[in-house]
Amino acid sequence: MSTALRATILIPLAALGCLAALIMVHRPTMAGQAGLGFWTLVGVLWLLAGIGLSALSHLRARSPAARRAVGLSVPILFGAFLFFLWEVIVVGAGVPSVLMPAPSAIAGRFMASLPTLREDFIQTFVKSVLSGYVMGCLSGFLVAIIADRIPFLRRGLLPLGNFVSALPVIGIAPIMVMWFGFDWHSKAAVVVVMTFFPMLVNTVAGLAAAGRQERDLMHSYAAGYWTTLVKLRLPVALPFIFNALKINSTLALIGAIVAEFFGTPIVGMGFRISIEVARMALDMVWAEIALAAIAGSAFYGLIALIERAATFWHPSYRT
Amino acid sequence: MLKRVTSEFGEKGDGPAHAASDHRLVAGHAGTSVVDIRGLSLTYEAADGPVYALSDVDLQIDEGEFVSFIGPSGCGKTTLLRVIADLEQPNAGHIHVNGVSPSEARLRRDYGFVFQTPALYPWRSIRKNVELPLEIFGLSKAERRERSDKQLDLVNLKGFENKFPWQLSGGMQQRASIARALSFDPKLLLMDEPFGALDEIVRDHLNEQLLQLWRKTGKTVLFVTHSIPEAVFLSTKIVVMSPRPGRIIDIIDAGVLGRERRLEVRETPEFLKIAHRVREGLRSGHSYDD
Ligand SMILES: Nc1ncnc2c1ncn2[C@@H]1O[C@H](COP(=O)(O)OP(=O)(O)OP(=O)(O)O)[C@@H](O)[C@H]1O
Ligand SMILES: [Mg+2]
């Protein structure tokens, strides 16, 4: 059987099987007491999906659009299958929801608590993360430019940067709460501290990355410091800067959520996680985690898209 | 890292400048030498001791000449070119370019430098690369456009203006870098093994194109190479160098081959005679090694 045929037959077959298994496992007679027959079915589906997906990922599509569609569908189908496994195992084996709620339960909780999630999202992501991220990245970038002009600053700041990067958020968060109060300002401050140094270190490295001949060229045109900076060194530094922006997008979210564990008004993703855990409402905790995952990936994805457009010339993106 | 010995020779000092121009008057070169080098030495201070990259170099280059520098690896060809272009500072000696110090000449934008690699900026299209010096010099958009069109035409890159450097072959990239060097009409074209990484056939082709370009523009060209046929084919003057310490051991006039040259000139007795002399020079330079 050809790869294309295998993929087109096995994947829909597996999808139908999964659907049947999902309906089956949610029947009251089955939930929590699935027998050997059911688990065998799941095992067979696993096998089918595995072979189908592997065939799909080996598929050589001719047109670029089709290739992109195949490239996208493999991780989506794979992820969907993982969710399926999670659902049938938790429901079929009757895992207590305090330990691990089923994806369907989390989705249900998510939809039911949209207003709360919205408020938490605005408090944590829009106010703390975004403002802290912008301030931290911008100041890291500006200080890097200043440090580039003043060598002793560079020599002094970089080791300090490594030191601060090693500081745990847990340590600085309570201090920032003391300094800036309970509201989002203290969370933004934590985010600033966390994002500042990665940006500084990366930008300084990027500014030093221009090659000798490229710099000699500027010198032979009698170009001044700023001309060389704008026309050569900043473009060369761009991939480094985007690297910092991507690292920081995840750091900022982690920082803001963890910082909320140390005192916050009664809103925010970190706050919600800490009190819902105490109330054993694990489905709400998971809903918040899902929200954080969605927001974090969207943020990262957006930066990666901008990076692609801005550094299209870089060897890793050339077409 | 390596550090240069601090120069006792003030690049902008008035003293040496006067001394040199007096000297030149005495020598009867007044007004003709584009590059005038006397007693030039340069030592790199490396971690394991000094490297005598250039030692007591004397050289006069006239306007409109095509001068090749040839010699074994490490004999200081690149260093000499970089000193002329004010990218390195000598420890001793006098150097004048069009009657002023290299640094003044650089600030006057007298140099078009073509490096061993094309050194095009990958985020700029070919046209934008050629226009880079013009942007820096503050030319208007229309004028930049006109000049880049002209230069790209001159190096046969018409139709590739909007490509990016990495989309072009190595030979095309090097031609673009030549167009960039010529775009602001510098007095001197300095080329450091520009075709070193290219295959023989492309190289022959580019050599012919370069000769045509040189005849059309009448520029003074300083050209570093490892290839004897290339040096003889292109040059009106061949400077043979030898290493440790880097110095000039022979200066050969190749003007007899005329200015109009085709590749077939390489089979003529005159050509072979000059090539033979270059080879002899290189060989005698090597014997110092042992
Ligand atoms: N920045 C530097 N610091 C220390 N030594 C250097 C430096 N640049 C060149 N040298 C040394 O100076 C000598 C001359 O180098 P140069 O690059 O001018 O040689 P070259 O004739 O151009 O050689 P090639 O044909 O390999 O390009 C070499 O011995 C080299 O090791
Ligand atoms: Mg060299």
Image: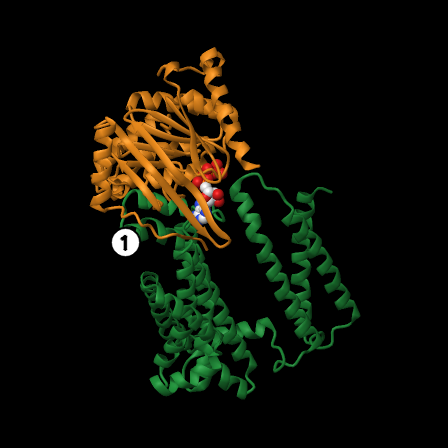
**Residue A253 spot, x, y in % from top left:** 45, 72
Q: Along the horizontal axis of the image, is B89 left or right of B232?
A: left
Q: Along the horizontal axis of the image, is A58 left or right of B182?
A: right
* Label 1 CA crowd tier, 10 Å (few <14, some 14–19, many 20+): few
The chain carrying label 1 is A
Residue identified by numbered label 1: A226
User: In this rendering, is residue A303 above or below A194?
Assistant: above
Instruction: Inspect this view and state whether residue B265 appears.
Output: yes
Residue plotted at (29% across, 33% down): B36
Which quadrant would residue B125 be assigned to in this image?
A: top left
**Residue B198 spot, x, y in % from top left:** 50, 30
Q: Amino acid at mark 1?
A: Trp
Please state which of residues A60 and A35 is positioned toward the viewer in this rendering.
A60
Residue plotted at (50% across, 34% down): B72
Q: Residue furthest top?
A: B269
**Residue A95 spot, x, y in % from top left:** 67, 78
Q: Residue furthest right?
A: A36
Q: Along the horizontal axis of the image, is B221 left or right of A255?
A: left
The chain letter corresponding to orange is B
Instruction: Inspect this view and state whether residue A314 appears.
Output: no
Q: Colour of chain A?
A: green
Please state which of residues A171 and A219 is positioned toward the viewer in this rendering.
A219
Residue plotted at (27% across, 30% down): B34
